[in-house]
Image (cartoon, rainbow, N blue to C red):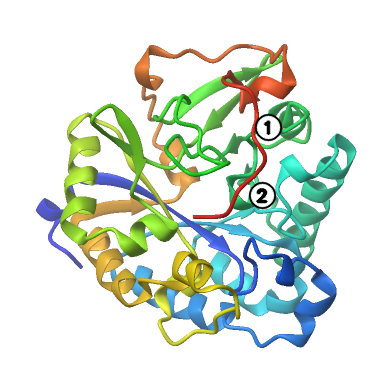
Amino acid sequence: MTPAGRRASKAILTVDFEDWFHIADPSFSDPTIWDHLPTDVEQDTLALLDLLDEHDARATFFVVGWLVERTSDTLREIVRRNHELGVHGYYHVPPSALTENEFRRDILKCRQAIADVTGVEAKGYRAPFFGVRGCPFPYLDILGECGFRYDSSVLPGVLPGRGQPGAPAAPHEIDIHGLTMWEIPVSTVRLFGIPVAFAGGGFLRHFPSPFIDWSSARLTESGLPVVYYIHPRDLNPQGHEAPASRWRRFRYYGGRRSVRRKLRRLLESSAVTSVEGFLADGARPEPADGRRPIARPTRPLEVVGAFVTEAPEQPGEQA
C-alpha cells in the first residue's frame, strides 16, 4: 500500500462499463449485431479490479444493461470486491435521443437487470456519451421519481455537442420537487477562462501526465475531489478497435498505452473512492462559480441538468 502521506488528496473514480463497440458510430448502433462481435470488457475489467485492489481503491461502475446477463460473473465480482454499480442505460442510448417514456423504461430496465443478477439496487446514473445537452424533457425529474440518488452526466467543459461549459463544475446538491439529489460532474480545469476536461476518456488518454497532474493539483488545492472516468478498454492497448475512420479510432482508442501508467499514478497519489463513498463521507462542497441549482426546470429545451443554459445543439461524438 502507498504511504498515507502520499494519499492525502481525494479522488472519485468512475468506470463506464461498456465494450469496445459501444461507441458513437452508426455502424455499431444496432444491438442486434453486438452478439456477433468479440468481447473485451470482462478481461479488461478483471485487470482493472486487480489494479484497484493493489491500492485499496474503490470505484463506481456505470453499467450498460445489455451487458448484464452476458457478464453476470464479472458484475458479481465487482460487487464482491466492494465497488459500486450504477446505471448507464440499457442499450447505451443517450437521453437526448429518447422520449420521456423511453428514457424511463430504459433506466428502469437497466436497474432491474443489475438487481436481478447482483442483488444491488443502483442509485446513480450516467448518460451514455454524456448525452443530456438538448434533452427535450427534464431527465433529472425522472431520475428523482425513480429513486436515484445522484446523476453524473454533466461534463462542464468543451466537448462538441455534449460539453456544458456553463454548468457548475463542483459536486453539488440539487432539489427535485423537494427531493435532494447530487450532481457529480466530471472534473474540469480553467485555462485562460475556458473550462477544459482532463480527467477521463480521450482527455485522459491523450493529455500528457504533467498536465493531468497539474490540473488535479489545482482542484485538490481548492478543496474539491477530482472526478475521473475511464472505460475498461482504455487499459488494453491490444484490445479490439472498430473499423471506423482514422479520426474516430484516434478519439476512441488512441493513447491507451499511457492509461495504466496514469491510473497507477492517480492511485498512488490519492485516496480513491466511489461516488457512494464520497457521499457517505458527508462532503458538502459548494457549487462552483457561485451558480445555484433551481428547484424546477421551466424551459426543458434550454436546460442542462437542472441548470438553465444556452439553446440545445445536436449531440456530437463521444470523448
Residue 58 can be seen in this image: no
| Residue at 72%, 11% in the rendered image | 298
Mark closer to the chain start, 2 or 1: 2
| Residue at 29%, 33% in the rendered image | 224
Return the residue nearer the eye: 26 or 197: 26
State the image coordinates of residue 312 (x, y, percent, origin top left).
Answer: 65, 29
In the image, 80: left or right of 256? right
10 Å neighbourhood of mark 2: few (<14), some, or many (≥20)? many
| Residue at 69%, 15% in the rendered image | 297
State the image coordinates of residue 95 (x, y, percent, origin top left).
Answer: 73, 42
Q: Secondary structure at mark 1?
A: loop
Mark 1: amino acid: Gly
| Residue at 58%, 77% in the rendered image | 41
Mark 2: amino acid: Ala
In the image, 110: left or right of 319? right
Return the residue nearer the eye: 87 or 235: 235
Q: Secondary structure at mark 2?
A: loop
Q: Mark 2 vs mark 1: give the one in front.
A: 1
Disc 1 marks which residue? Answer: 134
Disc 2 marks which residue? Answer: 122
Q: Is residue 307 above or below residue 59?
A: above
Q: Is residue 34 above or below residue 188?
A: below
Q: Say which quarter of the image contains residue 152.
A: top right
